[in-house]
Each structure stands twice: as C-alpha cells, then as structure tokens.
Image (tube, rainbow, N blue to C red):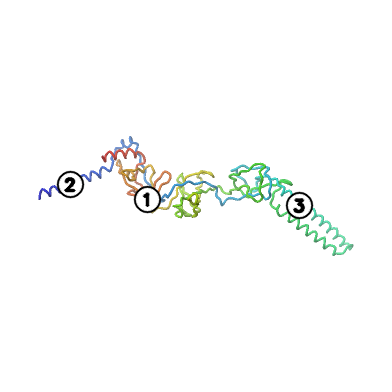
Amino acid sequence: MRTTLFTLIASCVLFTHLAVDAAASETISLTEKQISRLGITAQASLSADETSLANVPAKIVPVRTSMKAITAPFEGVLTKIHVLPSQKIKAGQILFTVRSRDYLDMNIGLQTAKGELEAANIALHQQTLLVDEGLSAGTTLLPLKANVMRAQALVDEHRAPLRGIHSAGQSQYYIKAPANGRIEDFDLQIGQSIAPMNAVTAIYTSDDLWAEVMVPEDLVGQVQAGDSIGFDDGAFGEVVSASRIIDPKTKSAMLVAKVPTGSGFNPGQLIQVNISKPSQAGKMVKVPASAIIRLDGQTNIFLKHNGDFTPIAVHVTGRSRGYATIAGRINAGDQVAVTGLTELKAIHLAEAE
C-alpha cells in the first residue's frame, strides 16, 4: 500500500515537472546579440478604434455636387477651343466658339423684327405730329399703336432665346464659364457638331474629391453614411452615402466617401480603401500585418518581453493595408515581433521536437 502511494506521488511530481517544462518551452529566450543577428524587430500594438471589414478597390472622382453642366444653346459646329483640360478658369471666361446656322437665323429674325419695330414707331410718331397739329383725327393712331405693339412683341420673341448668349459675330457665339472652377476633361475637336441644350462638358467648382467604392454584397447595409473609410496613407474619410441597391452584374453596391484634404490623389485614379466599423474599446488591437504567422495550425503573434518571445494564438477580425486587427491575449502597447518571424518559428519547432 505504501509502495503504491509512493509511486502515485512520484508520478504526480513527474507530471507536474513535465508540464512546467512544456510551458517554459513555449517561450523563446534570446540575448540582444542573438536578436540582432536573427534580424528580429518588434513594434507596439495599437488600440483598434476601427475593425476592418474589407479592403476593396475605389475610383477617385471630383465631387459630383460641385459639378455644373456647360451647355450649347444652339446647334452648331465647334470652331475654337479657348481652354485646356484641368485648367483653372474664372466665371465669364470664354471656353468655346461655335458657328451656328440657327443662331444666325435668330439674329437675322431679331434684326428684321427690330427694323419693323423702328418703322412702326416712325409711322406712329409722324401720325402723332399730324394729330397734334389738328390735321388728322386721333382715331388714326389706334392701328399704328397696335402695329408698334405687334412689332415689339415680335422683337421680344426673337430676343428671348438670345438673352445671355455672347455673340462672336452674326453667325458665331461664345460659350462662357458659368462659375469659377476647373474643367477636368473634355473630348472635343474643332469641327465637331454640337447638339442644342446638351452638355458640352462640365465645370467643377471645388477641388475636393470623392472615392467611389464598390461594396461587396455581403457588406451592403453594414456601412452607413457617417462611417469611415481608410486610405493608403493612414488617413480616414467620411462616408457620404451608401446605396443598398445591388448591381446584378458586379454583385456590389455603390458607396461614396470624402477623400481627405491633401491626399495627393487625382481624378480617375484607382486605389484600394479599407471599409471599417467602430470596434469595442479595449477588446481589439491593431498590429502590422507582418506580425501574423501560422504556427501549429493556428494564427499567432510572437509577444516580446525583454529578451523573451512567446507565441500567442489570436483571431484576425479584419485587415487593412499593412495592418491586421486582432483579438486575443494581447493589449494595446504590447511589443510584438514584426520581422524575424521565420527564425522564431524555426526555433519554436526545433524546441518542440
């Protein structure tokens, strides 16, 4: 009985000793010289205010609400282009010259109507003199006054379509800028036909930019106006609108976000943006993506404390450009290895054997 009890106690002591050794083997202890030789560096983990949902492509565009269409009032042919794409322009500046048969006809009609009005006024004036001198009855003025009114109405009818049109001669007119701004692009050539009341191009009155993002259908509804979008340089932009209408071809919906001022992006540029949502405070941290490694079939990071590196299993909740948001036994400010992970993994596997 005493022998059996002694054996049981010895077994327990041996098991405890092995368990302690196994736990100790999880931590890799290195000297500063070894750390330097292996090229191991560490960075502090950051508090994750945002949880990344997806990293998706986006297109940079001018702010649509700042766009003003520039139209041609009469059909014609483009005879001169006075500006260049992306050139800053001022209100009233001449942009294009158009030769138009319709504009010529309207001008001729207006001049003809003015001539008839002048003749009617002369006839009325002469007849008024005769009436004033008693040489003619006053009733003779009535038809002449009616003629003046009719001629004036005809002048007004021809003048109305020409109001606001800037003449460049009998058969040509100018198209001028309606406001200060910039014409980002136009596909126009000399001799090109211009359709009436169609937009020739557009002027953008603001230098601000938007990012148009195609949101995957599984994230539609999770992002709303007021949420944030992360850009490559680490800056964030506010979501302006988030459509819930899914395009059957692309299986995505349109999201529009403000581009931070001074981003350096240009209209038409294709970039990657990170869709994120506010995370629970203190529950998640952000680490460089290079800190993540697969170890023993799990996702791990190597937590550094002085010269010790301990593998910690974590759960990746989101990724953005260069960073991963993780949850696990790690707090903001903890040092994690970001280079030399292959060497640490090799040492870990060697010690496990």
Q: Type of residue at label 2?
A: Val
- Residue 216 in the image: above or below residue 130: above
Mark before the other along the chain sequence, 2 or 3: 2
**Residue occupied by mark 2:** 13
Q: Amino acid at mark 3?
A: Gly
**Whole-percent x, y for residue 311 in the image:** 31, 44
> Which residue is under mark 3?
109
Left or right: 192 with respect to 140?
Answer: left
Q: In which quadrant will I find the C terminus?
A: top left
Mark 1 element type = loop
Residue 283 pos. (x, y %) = 36, 52
Distance from label 1 to label 2 (Cα)?
Answer: 39 Å
Q: Callout 2 environment at 10 Å: few (<14), some (14 to 19), or many (20+)?
A: few
- Residue type highlighted by circle 1: Met
Checking the image for residue 284, the label placed there is 1
The residue lying at 76 percent from left, 56 percent from top is 154
